[in-house]
Amino acid sequence: EVRLVESGGGLIQPGRSLRLSCTASGFDFGDFALSWVRQTPEKGLEWVGFISGNPSAGRTEYAASVRGRFTISRDDSKSVAYLQMNSLKTEDTAVYYCTRGPYYDSTGYCVHWGQGTLVSVSS
Amino acid sequence: EIVMTQSPATLSVSPGERATLSCRASQTIYTNLAWYQQKPGQAPRLLIYGASTRATGVPARFSGSGSGTEFTLTISSLQSEDFAVYYCQQYENWPPYTFGQGTKLEIK
């Protein structure tokens, strides 16, 4: 069974940094691309960014709203992906989901989703 | 960026009846469209990909159709567990992947 478990969310002040983790199990982690998707009541579902799997491992793409502030990485030896969020803004408040699609070089559609972790950016 | 527009925002249907949800893309996405179902407190669940292919374990009462810019999700006979929010997502032209704003399917 494929499982994605996010962790690391919480309350953080604007301008600070936070790192989310996505721990995976039940599949060959390195062979699949992963995306982070966030959700707010106001904006709905918003794709945040992606990291490719093998053989093009390490390619990343980001939404314009987070480019330059957020960084996605992965440690295939631990089956973990990370979302490093710097210079956080109040508008980054959301539930963050780790998702996996069927491909290695793009996420495409999100076959699997984690349970989500809430990030609240507030002073 | 491709904009996805769903209609209606809220749909009220009685159990046992048919529900038809619409999704429109701002430019052609061929059949690179997915539908998701989300219940309160849960993550979205993939229902349909490729505009018309049911994901594993999805009941046959769910069907998707369309291509280009116009798409439809049909639930043929609504069960109590089907009342939820439904989202469409395009994966033709990225970054970014984009989602519709959702249709809430409620009990009439």
Image: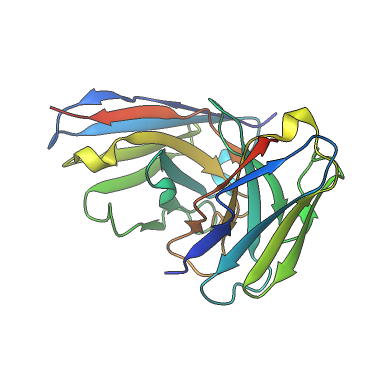
Left/right placement of residue B75 relative to residue A118 reads: right
Question: Is residue A13 something one can see in this rendering?
Answer: yes
Relative to A71, is A114 above or below?
A: above
Where is residue B6 drawn, in percent x and y?
Answer: 56, 57
Most distant residue in the front direction = B108
Render colour scheme: rainbow
**Residue drawn at 80 percent across, 33 percent down:** B79
**Residue A26, horizontal then vertical, whole percent:** 65, 30
Screen quadrant of the N terminus of chain A: top right
Decide if residue A111 is in sight here. no
Q: Residue at x 56, y 62 (%)?
A: B91
Answer with left or right where residue A14 lies relative to residue B106: left
Residue A15, image x, y percentages: 12, 37
- The residue depicted at 37 percent of the width and 43 percent of the height is A42
- Left or right side of B17 for B44: left
| Nearer to us in this view, A3 or B73 | B73
**Which quadrant of the figure has residue A13?**
top left
Q: Is residue A79 above or below residue B51?
A: above
Q: Nearer the viewer, residue B40 or A69?
A: B40
- Name above or below for residue A38 compared with residue A105: above
Front position in the image: A79 or A20: A20
Q: Position of residue B21 (x, y in %)?
A: 68, 54
**Quadrant of the frame with the C terminus of chain A:** top left
Q: What is the total number of numbered labels drawn onto the structure image?
A: 0
The residue located at (83%, 42%) in the rendering is B17
